[in-house]
Image (cartoon, rainbow, N blue to C red):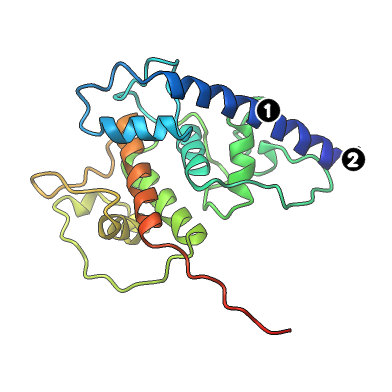
Amino acid sequence: MNIKRTFMVLSTLGYLALSMTNQAVAATSSFTDVNDVAAKEKIISLQQRGILHGVNDKQFMPDATVTAAQGIQLIVNALGLDIDNIRFIQEPKATHYYAKANDNAWYAPALIIAAHNGLQLPADLDPNQAWSREQFLYHLVTAIEQHGQLPMINLAPVAIKDEDALNPSYQGAVQRALHFGIVKLDAEGSLHPKATLTRKEAAEFIYNAIEYLQAHPAPAAENVQP
């Protein structure tokens, strides 16, 4: 068995084992610390679908911050991204793409998948750094646009009260996130782009993104005569 196939078999078996275990837990339990969270039903729905997991089978810790690694894993899970159709000459490692990564960390497979699925992540990505709301929204929106084959659209910009705090590089993606209904402004019309992303916010954004994709499926490929 060659290196690439060995890696793929082991990764697939490991993923399936983890997925089956988490789905079994989700089918018989729900988080007990989300009762007062506005996005409770969305969080539980994602748990039951195996898209997100708690710190254990009962606790989600909705107010905990989200790291880059956790955010990337959520996007990979939500879009069902993989590297199954890629042939590698040598076993890929997370550090081949992101120097600050740990090849033995739980997140390493997700970083490899992200690198081969067009997620626009910087080479100096720190997997353990907390992500802001604008960072997560940018990577989520660009990922769903690419893999959901969403058409380019002209949007009337939404007035954001704290727009001056928004990274100009993320501005377009954030505007589209507002248009897609992935995120909403608060009662004062602010986005709080630099605020650290919480687990409950990430779950809500992921749920809303999936809902948008389901309501706007990619166009069917045209039949082409040989």
Q: Is residue 68 above or below residue 84?
A: above
Q: Nearer the viewer, residue 19 or 37?
A: 19
Q: Is residue 64 above or below residue 97?
A: above
Q: At which x and y percent is residue 92?
A: 74, 41
Q: At which x and y percent is residue 177?
A: 31, 55
The quadrant holding residue 111 is top right
Distance Cα–Cα, label 2 vs label 1: 18 Å
213 horizontally vs 220: left or right = left
What residue did someone put label 2 on? Answer: 2
Q: Is residue 197 above or below residue 223?
A: above
Residue 130 visible in the picture: no
Q: Residue furthest front?
A: 28
Residue at x-position 40% and y-position 56%: 213
Q: At which x and y percent is residue 154?
A: 30, 74
Quick check: marks 2 and 1 in contact, CB under 8 Å? no
What residue did someone put label 1 on? Answer: 14
115 horizontally vs 179: left or right = right
Q: Secondary structure at mark 1?
A: helix
Residue at x-position 57% and y-position 22%: 21
